[in-house]
Image (cartoon, helix red, strand yellow):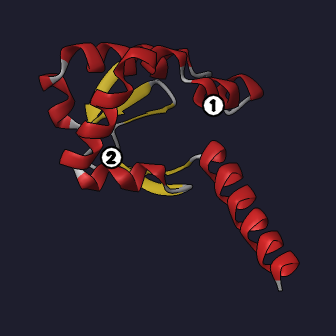
């Protein structure tokens, strides 16, 4: 699997390529955990991928470092959007699409019930 750089995300797997932020190499433990996580993804989105992102077992001991990395590199927050530019590709993240849709639905429901 080929590893390439993109500043718009911490990490993302597209086909046989894994895109990581170029500064991630300066954090070897976090880098290894993220690469392991990305390698676990299938080649097309499946329920396994959804559960993988939901549980995120590979990053269990690295969450604090992960969020500090994102705060130091704010452009990586673009990778949390359901649609983002990663390297030469436009990537659709179904997990974030589902999460954002549910969030909007719950907020809408909350406001309708409250009013």
Q: Are marks 1 and 2 in contact (CB under 8 Å)?
A: no
Mark number displayed over residue 95: none
Name the residue located 35 percent from the left edge and 44 percent from the top edge: 9
Left or right placement of residue 39 versus residue 107 in this view: left
Q: Quadrant of the N terminus?
A: top left
- CA distance for labels 1 and 2: 24 Å
The image shows residue 24 at horizontal and vertical percentages of 21, 29
Left or right placement of residue 77 versus residue 71 in this view: right
Can you name the residue that lies furthest to the right here?
113
Left or right placement of residue 108 versus residue 73 in this view: right
The residue under label 2 is 87
Front residue of this view, candidates 112 and 19 = 112
Secondary structure beneath label 1: helix
How would you rate the neighbour count of disc 1 (Cα within 10 Å): few for under 14, some for 14-19, many for 20 or more? few
Name the residue located 61 percent from the left edge and 24 percent from the top edge: 55
Instruction: For residue 43, say whether it is visible.
Output: no
The image shows residue 59 at horizontal and vertical percentages of 43, 20
Q: Earlier in the sequence, mark 1 or mark 2?
A: 1
Tell me the mark number nearer the camera, choosing from 1 and 2.
1
In which quarter of the view is residue 108 placed? bottom right
The residue under label 1 is 54
The image shows residue 58 at horizontal and vertical percentages of 47, 15
Q: Quadrant of the C terminus?
A: bottom right
Residue 96 in the image: above or below residue 46 = below
Name the residue located 66 percent from the left edge and 46 percent from the top edge: 94
């Amino acid at each position: 699997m080929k590893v390439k750089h993109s500043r718009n995300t911490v990490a993302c797997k597209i086909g046989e390529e894994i895109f990581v932020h170029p500064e991630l190499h300066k954090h070897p433990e976090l880098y290894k955990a993220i690469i392991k996580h990305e390698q676990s993804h299938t080649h097309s989105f499946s329920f396994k991928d959804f559960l993988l992102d939901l549980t995120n077992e590979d990053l269990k001991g690295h969450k604090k470092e992960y969020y500090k990395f994102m705060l130091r590199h704010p452009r990586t927050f673009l990778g949390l959007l359901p649609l983002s530019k990663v390297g030469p590709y436009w990537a659709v993240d179904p997990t974030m699409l589902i999460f954002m849709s549910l969030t909007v639905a719950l907020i809408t429901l909350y406001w309708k019930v409250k009013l």
